[in-house]
Image (tube, rainbow, N blue to C red):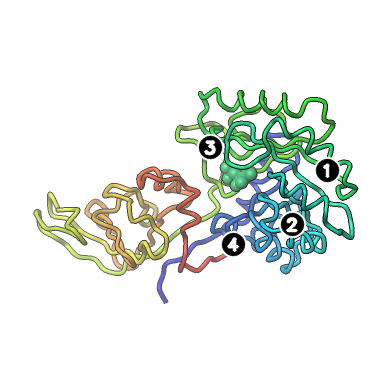
Amino acid sequence: MRPARALIDLEALRHNYRLAREVSGAKALAVVKADAYGHGAVHCAEALQGEADGFAVACIEEALQLREAGIQRPILLLEGFFEASELELIDRHDLWCVVHSLWQLEAIEQARLARPLTVWLKLDSGMHRVGLHPEDYQAAYRRLEASGKVARIVLMSHFARADELDCPRSEEQLAAFRLASRGLNAEVSLRNSPAVLGWPKIPSDWVRPGIMLYGATPFEQAHPLANRLQPVMTLESKIICVRELPAGEPVGYGARFVSERTTRVGVVAMGYADGYPRHAPTGTPVAIDGQASRIIGRVSMDMLTVDLTDLPQAGLGSRVELWGKQVLASDVAACAGTIPYQIFCNLRRVPLRYV
Ligand SMILES: *Cc1c(COP(=O)(O)O)cnc(C)c1O
């Protein structure tokens, strides 16, 4: 059997969830969209079911998958519904729903529902992706109240630059949110992972941690709270072939690496078809039997190559950690010019094993 696999540490997931609640002092929706950032939404939701205040997903298909697996806690649809016809399922499965556009508000006003909805009313406070215009916000709130279709409204917005700790934009967005929501007596939800970890003064009755649950930092620079996160996923495989090359020999497609000295090359059963980033260059860290090394040459579809020259005890069958508790996914992502969110979501073909 091919040795490539991803181990998922559900105790670490629970630790990170508790950390989000502890540092925010708020209720927390565990964001498990996109199959829990590649970690398996059903398993992750089951692991948190006993303690999570609720879950958040991107769409009704993801929510129904959780309901079918027996997840009973509240589930928020972060983009609400894409068509009014989804309201029937939202009603039947008791889902919470973001309203980010006026057409959604109108659809709720016209819907026939068995029970009143919980709506998270989203303001565009400056990210300019989705969310109601500040000038429409109060009127939308009043219309939802008057519709008779809504039991509870949570005021919500989303930050564009909370991962940039020196950037004033999050404070500006907060000021825009305060102005638009002035006088509305409702719970508030503003903070995603970087805002939970990096912006303690921004209020939130509900936080929405995603990436931090999986133990990866949302920041480019070191941060003391991010150091308390525990990586959840360990992507690992084994050395399947070893060869020794004299100086001056190329390795792999495009000869992107040429040995400068006698080099022991290990071939690892892991490639970009597994979601390992093809853009990871020579020098990207790996750990081999617990010792630091680096990849050399281009990542190919099913294999990649590593430097064993300074690890004489490593060889055929040695365990390779591509990312996990020793090699941080955020460091691999940075080498590949991307973010840990993307390398987790790109994972495929490798079996997930829950521990
Ligand atoms: C994905 C998402 C989150 C989680 O973001 P992280 O940076 O992963 O914590 C929070 N809120 C909304 C609206 C989202 O779409």
Q: Looking at the image, tell me whether mark 2 or mark 3 is earlier in sequence order.
A: 2
Marks 4 and 3, the one that precedes in the sequence? 4
**Disc 4 element:** loop
Judged by depth in the image, the label closer to the viewer, 4 or 3, is: 4
> Of marks 1 and 2, which one's residue comes earlier in the chain?
2
Q: Which of marks 1 and 2 is in front?
A: 1
Quadrant where the N terminus is found in the figure: bottom left
- Camera-side mark, 2 or 3: 2
Determine whether, in the image, residue 181 is placed left or right of residue 214. right
| Crowdedness near tag 3: few (<14), some (14–19) or many (≥20) residues, C-alpha within 10 Å | few
Marked residue nearer the N-terminal end (4 or 1): 4
User: What residue type is disc 3 on?
Assistant: Asn
Residue in the foreground of this view, choosing between 16 and 264: 16
Q: Name the residue under label 1.
A: 144
Indicate the quadrant where residue 240 lies. bottom left
Q: Which residue is drawn at 53% across and 49% down?
A: 231
Q: In this view, does 167 lie to the left or right of 174?
A: left
**Residues marked 1 and 2 touching at CB (< 8 Å):** no
Q: How many C-alpha atoms fall within 10 Å of the one at disc 2: few (<14), some, or many (≥20)?
A: some
Marks 4 and 1, how far apart at CA: 35 Å
User: Disc 1 versus disc 2: distance between alpha carbons?
Assistant: 30 Å
Label 4 vs label 2: CA separation? 14 Å
Camera-side mark, 1 or 3: 1
Horizontally, residue 210 falls left or right of residue 311, namely right
Q: In this view, does 119 lie above or below 252?
A: above
Q: Where is residue 136 in the image (x, y as percent from the top left)?
A: 73, 34
Q: Name the residue under label 3.
A: 227
Please name the amino acid that badge 2 sits on.
Gln
Q: Distance between the residues labelled 4 and 3?
A: 24 Å
Mark 2 lies on residue = 49
On the question of residue 209 being in view, the answer is no
* Residue named by callout 4: 40
